[in-house]
Structure formats: C-alpha cells, structure tokens
Amino acid sequence: MERAVRSRRRSAGRALAALVALAGLLIPAAPAQAAGPFDVLQLNLCDGGFAPCYSAGRSVDSAIAAIHRRKPAVVTLDEVCAPDITRMTRETGYLWAFAPSRDRATGGPLGCRDNRGDYGVGILTDPDLGAAGRSVIKPYTAQDGANEQRVVLCVPYSKAAACTTQLSPDAAVAARQCRELAGTARGLGPSAVSGGDLGLTGPAANPCAPEGWSHADDGGVQHVFGAHGYRLQRSETIPIDGAAHPGLLAEFAR
C-alpha cells in the first residue's frame, strides 16, 4: 500500500510540473523595457541684473513656458536669483536645488541687484527622477579677479544625477575650472548629466566632460554632457525671450 501511495504522489507531481510548463507557454513573457527618453534643457536667464541682457524677469516667463512645452527631465540654470527658482518650482511642479555664487568682498553669498535675493546657479528636475540626495556645492579652486566667485552644483537623485555651473569669462581660468568640473561630475557615476554656460567654445570645452561622455552644444558657450548611461540622440536651440542665449535642449536615450 505504501508503494501505491508513493506512485500516486509521483504521478501527481509529474502532472503538476506539466501544468506549470504549459502555463509558461501560454503566458507571454514581459516585453523588455525600451530605453526611455531623457532630455536636458540648459538655460542662462541673465536675471541677476548685472549684464546688459537683463530683462527684469522676462526670461523667467519664457523659461517656464519652455519647460511646460518640452517637459525636460532636467533643467540646468545659470544667472538666476533664488526667488526665480522658487517661482519656477511653483509654476512647473519640478523639484529644485540652488547654489549661490560667492562674494569675494564679503565671503558670503553674492546677491542679485536690487536686493532680489541670492544670485547663482540652479537645477530643476521632474519629480519622476525621485528624491534628491545631499547636494555637492564647490567653489572652484581657480578663480579670476572679479568679485563673483564661481561654483559648481551637483545633486544625486534616485534615478539620475545632475550638475550645473557657469565658468569664468577669462578663458584661461575657465579652462582650469573646466577640469575641476569634469572631476566632480565623474564622481557621480554613469547616470550623471551636466549642463552649463562654460564660456568656452568648440574643442576648448572638451576637457569639461569626462572621457567617453556624450556632448551637445549650441555652437557657442552653452554645453550639455551625458555620462556613459546616456546616448545623445539630437540637440536643438530654443528661443528664450529676454535672455542673451537661446536654450540648449539635448535629447538623450538611456
């Protein structure tokens, strides 16, 4: 009798295995996830009040409209005031990070003209990129003789990392800052992107990207780089009313 019970158990086990195998044939495998688009929009809004291109906030209006229209994953911002970032965050729903330039004379944050808050660089991100980790804000070792001391801002998010900066208008100093930028960005790994007004054109900007990173530029001083996890598909410039430069949109796949 015991032998008969064992035989029935073996038969039941074979039947169950056959059913599992049949189910595997009937249920299609989940399709592989396609590489998703990942767009980075670089903007110099010239809203500090220091330069002739200052338009009393018109560039901020235009930037908000461009973000709504193009919906980039990351927006890198130069020459903005802290209240600009607050407003852009409120009106787009994006997350934000901000780093003020340093004031050589006082050692503290540099302010925008007319007491409009701190002046510097910022990053806006689609909430889908996840929570922000601890920001990295580093003044460059190399600085020119101007009162504004330049900084780089980098932020790791759950699904990506981003850096932004504006380099010195002095080409020799910018070249040294450029190498510092590459070292900082390299430490963020294969999911990092970087955008900024680098003050450098053509091959002079190449050292700003770690080896093997993708590179897009506007034919002038604005550049976007993508780490090894990104493939540059195309780039274009976007008119930004009231700014000195058009926006640079780099479209990546990953």
Image (tube, rainbow, N blue to C red):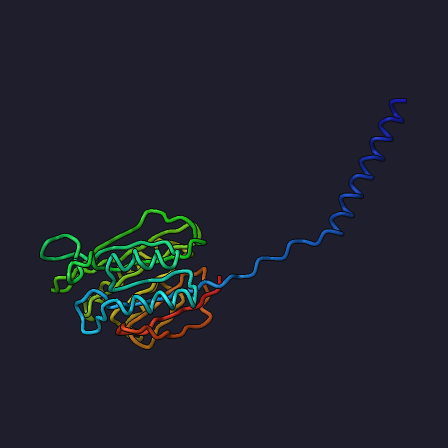
Q: Quadrant of residue 18?
A: top right
Would you say residue 212 is visible in this rendering? no
- Where does the image place residue 188, in percent across and percent down from the top left? 36, 53
Would you say residue 97 is visible in this rendering? yes
Q: How many marks?
A: 0
Of 24 and 76, the residue lying toward us: 76
For this orientation, the residue located farthest to the bottom is: 219
Report the side of 79 relative to 69 (left or right).
Answer: left
- Where does the image place residue 102, in percent across and percent down from the top left? 17, 56
Task: Determine the residue positioned at 76% across, 46% down.
Answer: 21
- Where does the image place residue 248, in percent across and percent down from the top left? 36, 71
- Where does the image place residue 254, in percent across and percent down from the top left? 49, 61
Q: Quadrant of residue 112?
A: bottom left
Task: Determine the residue positioned at 89% across, 27% down.
Answer: 4
Of 133 and 75, the residue lying toward us: 75
Whether residue 40 is situated above or below residue 26 in the rendered picture: below
Task: Determine the residue positioned at 42% across, 63% down.
Answer: 72
Task: Determine the residue positioned at 36% across, 59% down.
Answer: 91
Which corner quadrant holds the N terminus? top right
Q: Quadrant of residue 116?
A: bottom left
